[in-house]
Amino acid sequence: MSHSSLAAMHRATADRLGRRVALRTRRHGLYRDIRWESYRRRADGAAAALIAQGIGPGDRVGILAENGANWLTADIAVLSTGAADVPLHAPLAPRQVAYQLGHSGARACFVADQRQADKVIAVLDVLPALEWLIGFEPIAAPDRVRVTSWEALVHDGLRLGTDGLHDVLLRERSVQREDLATVIYTSGTTGDPRGVMLSHGNILSNAESVLAMGNAQPDDILLSWLPYSHIYARTVDHYLPALVGSVVCLAESVDTLTANLAETQPTWMTSVPRFYEKVWTAVAPLPPPERAARLRAIFGPRIRWLSSGGAPLPRHVAEGYHEAGLLLLQGYGLTESSPVISFNRIDRYKLETVGLPIPGVEVAIADDGEVLTRGPHVMLGYWNDPEATRAATEGGWLHTGDVGHLDAEGFLTITDRKKDLIITSGGKNIAPAMLEQLMVADPYIEQAVAYGDGRPFVTALIVPDLPRLREAARRLGRPEPGDAEFVTDEALVGFMADRVARGMEAVSQPERVRSFVLLGRPLRAEADELTATLKVRRRFLLEKYKAPLDALYHSPPGPHSGPES
């Protein structure tokens, strides 16, 4: 059945499933089930109150909060009013909050708590359109904005009774697939981000196509932890389960994922490569039978498959899981494509690829290797930026900015970002993602970023697996790495150089990483080195560490640890 809007789709499932469990959340150590009828009733209460307070079709409403049942309910409520929500990443700084709320012209904003409210309060002077803050927990704010608690909002709407529900239904029925559903600001590497406009139809078509692939089932139990401020989790962990009617268990945080897996025992899970890599790094040294048993124990007895997206999945990780009896499949997409463009099927996959285009989606490769796509999943455009919209959709195709190729069976492989290609001073075109995957395949390397555009050879910024490197230091009789920014001990740097050199044997001499800077600490999301989905912000890091990387070209080729070496 084709639905007219995301809110109408959610209502149809709630009407059909009623007393069945929709969400499972953990609070104060205990899990609580939220049934479809309660989920929908609270969304209707919030929507009725929003309408009564003047939120109308086309208005924008921000959501600045961590994942939770209230986040999901607020989203459905906003969509039911005909307004569009503007999801903000929870770790954003006040300046970033100011830009996204101000640029989108948001009239209201849901906030998780006083900590998030204070970010908005700090920049109220530059938000003339913002009239209203709604706190999932009690908050206080200056008289300049109206303040309401989430529970009061829901209660006020429910008090309106059948009249309030009538207003919600009337508004909801006026919303069509071509109407704006959300404005999502993509994390830019430089400058301010762009607001991607996605319609109800964009996102619905994507969820419907993923469902048609057969990977998701009504009796599934999904463990969800990726931030709903990203379209990946929004579509795959929120709207797709609502479409199929499966149960969504909300993880507490990335730090509790392993415990939450044991508690919820899901049948499938979506994540980013970083999580799967960390698990693999922990079990890789074990003998194969013990490794397989440990992986199965971590993900639980009911797991059918695992989903990876948002960044390239190292091939050795996918193959390692597969050998252990766990199907780890990756897909590919962008915020601008709602997001899924291609995905591997449970019954038809190639682990080294990002799968086949999903139903209804076209993929082509431009003359310069760029991946192009068109179909109902492609965004309406960038908010208030017609020039960027025209550039991104030139010729009727969405230009992804990624480089890749299609094999004879139609499976897509992504080789790199178009703008991230390294062209050495000798004219050699090198895909850094390929080199980075070779490096992180080594258990002593946690993360790596290749560098060398316009340079005579390729270098890299390397984050070691510090616990393993400390073990190596003890074996070599060297001091263990401390809290310094860089690892400078010559023996340890040489040890890592040998490992890098072995990994580089898979590529030609001009492509090989010949020197590197060795960091002495993990990358941190709070330092803007990782995105909210733990993806490495490569351009930010290359700019941050440009001086020590450039210094490598003034020394003889070979391992270097940092400016001190």
Image (cartoon, rainbow, N blue to C red):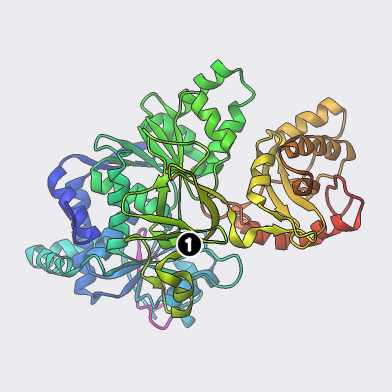
Residue in view at x 24 percent, y 38 percent: 218
Q: Nearer the viewer, residue 49 or 327?
A: 327
SS label for mark 1: helix
Residue 451 lies, with reference to residue 141, above or below; the image says above
x, y percentage for residue 504?
Answer: 74, 40
Residue 57, picture quadrant: bottom left
Total tally of numbered discs in the picture: 1
Instruction: Check the image and report above or below for 317 versus 144.
Output: above
In the foreground, 530 or 25:
530
What stretch of residues is rendered in magenta? 127-142
Dot 1 corresponds to which residue? 115
Q: Is residue 17 visible?
A: yes
318 relative to 363 in the view: left or right: right
Quadrant of the rendered structure where residue 25 is?
top left
Tell me where residue 559 sits by quadrant: top right
Dot 1: few (<14), some (14–19), or many (≥20) neighbours within 10 Å?
few
Q: Main structural element of the magenta stretch: helix, strand or loop?
A: loop
Residue drawn at (71%, 35%), measured in percent from left and top?
444
Judge by depth and name the residue closer to the eye, 229 or 550.
Answer: 550
Question: Looking at this rendering, what residue extends furthest in the left direction?
Answer: 162
- Residue pictured at 24% horizontal, 48% vertical: 243
Residue type highlighted by circle 1:
Arg
Measuring from the top left, give residue 3's x and y in whole percent. Answer: 19, 57
Is residue 113 in sight in this rendering?
Answer: no
Q: Is residue 494 left or right of residue 57?
A: right
For image coordinates 39% across by 23% down, the residue present is 301
Residue sticking out furthest to the right: 556
- Measuring from the top left, give residue 21's x and y in whole percent: 23, 40
Coordinates of residue 558 in the picture (x, y in percent): 87, 45
Q: Is residue 238 magenta?
A: no
**438 relative to 211 in the view: left or right:** right
- 194 with respect to 362 (left or right): right
